[in-house]
Amino acid sequence: MLNIPGHAAQTCEGPTRRELMRIGSLGLAGLHLPGFFQSQAATVADKFNGARGWGKAKNVVMIFLQGGPSHIDIWDPKPEAPSNIRGEFKPIKTKIPGTWIGEHMPMMANTMDKVTLIRSMSYTPNGLFNHTAAIYQMLTGYPPDKVSPSGQLEPPTPADFPTAGSHVSKLKPVKDAMLPFVELPRPLQESGIIGKGGAAGFLGKAYDPYRLYQDPAESIKLEDLALRKDVPPERLKDRFELLKGINGSMADLEKALNKTAVDEYYGKAYDLVLSGKARDAMDLNKETDSTRDRYGRHTFGQSALMARRLIEAGTRFVQVNWPSVANGDPEKTAWDTHAANFGPLKNLHCPKLDRSLSALLEDMDQRGLLAETMVVAIGEFGRSPRMGVSTSGNSNSPDGRDHWPYCYSGVVAGAGIGRGVQYGESDATASSPKEKPVHPNDLLATIYYALGIDPEMEIRNHLNQPRELVKGKVVADLFA
């Protein structure tokens, strides 16, 4: 059978025959399948018709800064706070009037006229918390139901809630022969827990991301996106035709399912290998040296550049993970600055983030991609405003900062999001929101909403139990 590259499962996953028959049986009650889907779409359209920001996005780039960047040192400086809170860095002006950010983000300071800076991200964890639980909350929209005393979760399971990109790839399938959801350059990870919050969970492996776990700053291998030498196009086509024949008894239902039909699902897998669009998008040698230099000749920078190329080629959702284990060594670019905060931020983290994120925003804006692509840059939490304290059961050096989900910052841009705006404000020590708190679920709800997906729609989990897509409120004021 055909396999979609990057997926462990065969392409017969997705809508099962039983599901198709169950939905198709609606025709017996006087409502046939096409009418059912048209009715659902019309209901959602009526619900949000004319609403600000609804359906403005075609694509999403999620810059996920796993590890917990220090909001007070990067996005929300407090120069008037006591020294053990304000830290070593000075604030600099940005293009948002009256908004200052940390001194080691000068390129972003000049790019803030293209974004909204949210300074009131906030949630309260259940008990002790660490990266895995926080990542799961941020990317699935649901809190974990089982957290160990250390704050870590169990490895990924088929019962997990799906990550946002998986929902998007199912609900907004791509039209062309292109990968719908790509994750790079490394998995989400805390210690030995790999990929939690980054898989399709109960949606099934067919909606997992294409995982490009390679360093785009080096030569990458794309054999899985190329036709095997021993399988000529004609033979691959014969195999595809055979699959169509096997599913011949489902023809009427597949036709009714339109874009999500099983037949078309196979067809896209077939076309994906032959078209070469994905391979071309991942070939950074097609970019000029000056462009690659602007993004930064390092893993994170070249990953951001590849994200832009994937969006141009038709990928719906690209997730760029900060290329370091969430609780890794800060001297090796991990954001987890318990033992040392200011040196790594000054010499490693901020220079890379500053250059690459500003380049992505400027490049996408110049190409017209920002008008229809929502860009989100955020971590799973911030860092404790007061240095040297323990907030998560971890030990911290006098100049280190611990985990802090109660107030932190994020950057959003594109697809109708306000330009040159600060949304929300933290208190005098960046410890809690002073106004307009935004829960991670609210941010996810806003992403779905921008894509034209009802965040309150009902989904079914692995036990066929009804659940909301996400329990969050759309932050409509983020849109201009």
Image (cartoon, grey):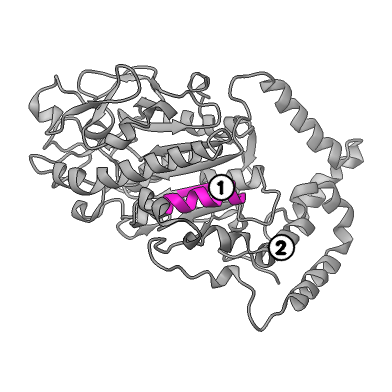
Q: What residue type is labelled 1?
A: Ile
Establish if 468 lies above or below 163.
Answer: above
Quarter of the image with the N terminus in it: bottom right
Which residue is the site of mark 1?
Answer: 311
- Which residues fall within the magenta stretch? 303-319
The percent coordinates of residue 332 (x first, y second) are 22, 56
- Residue depicted at x 69% and y 67%: 274
**Residue 271's mark?**
2
Task: Determine whether, in the image, residue 298 is placed left or right of residue 441.
Answer: left
- Local SS, label 1: helix
Callout count: 2
- Residue depicted at x 88% and y 61%: 249
Say whether marks 2 and 1 touch (CB < 8 Å). no
Crowdedness near tag 1: few (<14), some (14–19) or many (≥20) residues, C-alpha within 10 Å: many
In front: 330, or 107? 107
The percent coordinates of residue 445 (x first, y second) are 53, 31
Regarding residue 160, the answer to whether it shows in the image is no
